[in-house]
Image (spheres, coloured by chain):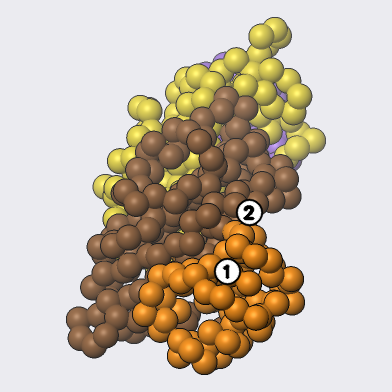
Chain colours: A yellow, B brown, C purple, D orange
Amino acid sequence: MSDFRISRRAIDPAAELGALEDAGSGAVVSFCGRVRNHNEGRAVTRLEYECYEALAVTEGARVIAEARESFGASRVRCVHRTGDLAIGEAAVWVGAAAAHRSAAFEAARYVIDQVKKRVPIWKREHYPEGPAEWINAAPSEAS
Amino acid sequence: MSDFRISRRAIDPAAELGALEDAGSGAVVSFCGRVRNHNEGRAVTRLEYECYEALAVTEGARVIAEARESFGASRVRCVHRTGDLAIGEAAVWVGAAAAHRSAAFEAARYVIDQVKKRVPIWKREHYPEGPAEWINAAPSEAS
Amino acid sequence: MRVRVDYFAVLRERAGRAHETLDTSASTPRELYRELSARRQLPPGKGLKVAVNDEFRNWDWALAEGDRVVFIPPVAGG
Amino acid sequence: MRVRVDYFAVLRERAGRAHETLDTSASTPRELYRELSARRQLPPGKGLKVAVNDEFRNWDWALAEGDRVVFIPPVAGG
């Protein structure tokens, strides 16, 4: 199974962490991004994630490989949800194992930063009132 | 229960993570430091941790409070093992929840760095051959 | 030349479809987007990226018969 | 003056005990450590910290009857 995955089912952090097990790695850092009940001051009721999967999995795998090589992490994994998510559900999970804590922290941070920047996944927020909105899609926010 | 704990029993990362739950926190970062099978090129068979508990819990609680205030994290927790640990066992676990990922990463990193620097816990490494050694205890390494 | 275009997220909603196969005289993604943005009420291409056959390519990449082209709105995972 | 001293880690091993209660004429942790390091073969105090009644204190803190004093080797948690 690839170290970068797209999943339509709930993320299981305990199972993901288990897959990082390695007696040589003294440090394991995990990041979990969850659906918040608010964003930029506005109440959020749920989220939808859509993904261009064929490209997401190759770009995600590149990000993982870069993290491993740049920081000397022994294992790095990431899984991103798609579909409808409720408040509090995990949208993305990243784990990094390394001999020392700096490498594990830096690798995990790199993966989530790059995934948010490069991997073709989009989210649409739903609000108590008014139409749902694709986040980031406004021309003014285009990179 | 305090947000900094000393434990003679195995750390349960899933239970620790559960205690960070909070619908307003979009980001959760955890760090787990585990007993490695080597240190500075030498094979390690097991570790012993000893703790000056009365001071460790107050100093640990200060570190947690500093992390929460400095980075605006909503919840921060840490648990440190004492006693005999086998290879692969978790020696320390840190979790930080925050609205945004930077705060969660920085708070978790701060806690493990400060705990290692300030909280009165000591470890003794056991090797395949030769006497066990208290780590850091050599005068040349004294801070 | 016949190409397939897939739409995601905000572009899927604007285009009113998830994909289409079309005959075009466009020889690059840039020309193709210009043609489609008029026909499908797509927003200006600024800020978009483009993939051809599931790899990021530049806007002047030479399209070939049967290519799959995807215009990629600013991403927002995590 | 009577004080209690607790030993941890490498100091516990050097002192051959986890704690002791003793009568001393030392009025500060610095003087107390000097007295004990001779009697208990403790290493030089450089790099150690000191706690009195479970709070970090400086080496010139005024000791009082019944205080609990702990000399703290360089820590190594995590």
- Residue positioned 30% across, 41% down in the render: A15
Q: Is residue B29 left or right of residue A135?
A: left
**Residue extending furthest toward the right:** A140
Tell me residue B103's x, y (percent): 66, 46
Question: Is residue B68 at least partly visible in the picture?
Answer: yes
Residue B43 picture quarter: bottom left
User: Mark 1 falls within which chain?
Assistant: D
Q: Is residue D29 left or right of residue D44?
A: right
- Residue positioned 60% across, 88% down in the render: D34
Nearest to the observer: residue A134 or residue B39: B39
Q: Helix or strand or loop: what does disc 1 sit on?
A: strand
- Residue positioned 48% across, 89% down in the render: D39
Tell me residue D74's x, y (percent): 54, 76
Task: Give amino acid for label 2.
Answer: Val
Q: Is residue A19 above or below residue B46?
A: above
Q: Is residue B135 left or right of residue D49?
A: left
Tell me residue C15's x, y (percent): 60, 20
Nearest to the observer: residue D47 or residue D54: D54
Nearest to the observer: residue C71 or residue D35: D35
Q: Is residue B16 left or right of residue B54?
A: left
Determine which residue is flagged by label 1.
D3
Q: Is residue B107 above or below residue A129?
A: below
How many numbered circles does the render carry? 2
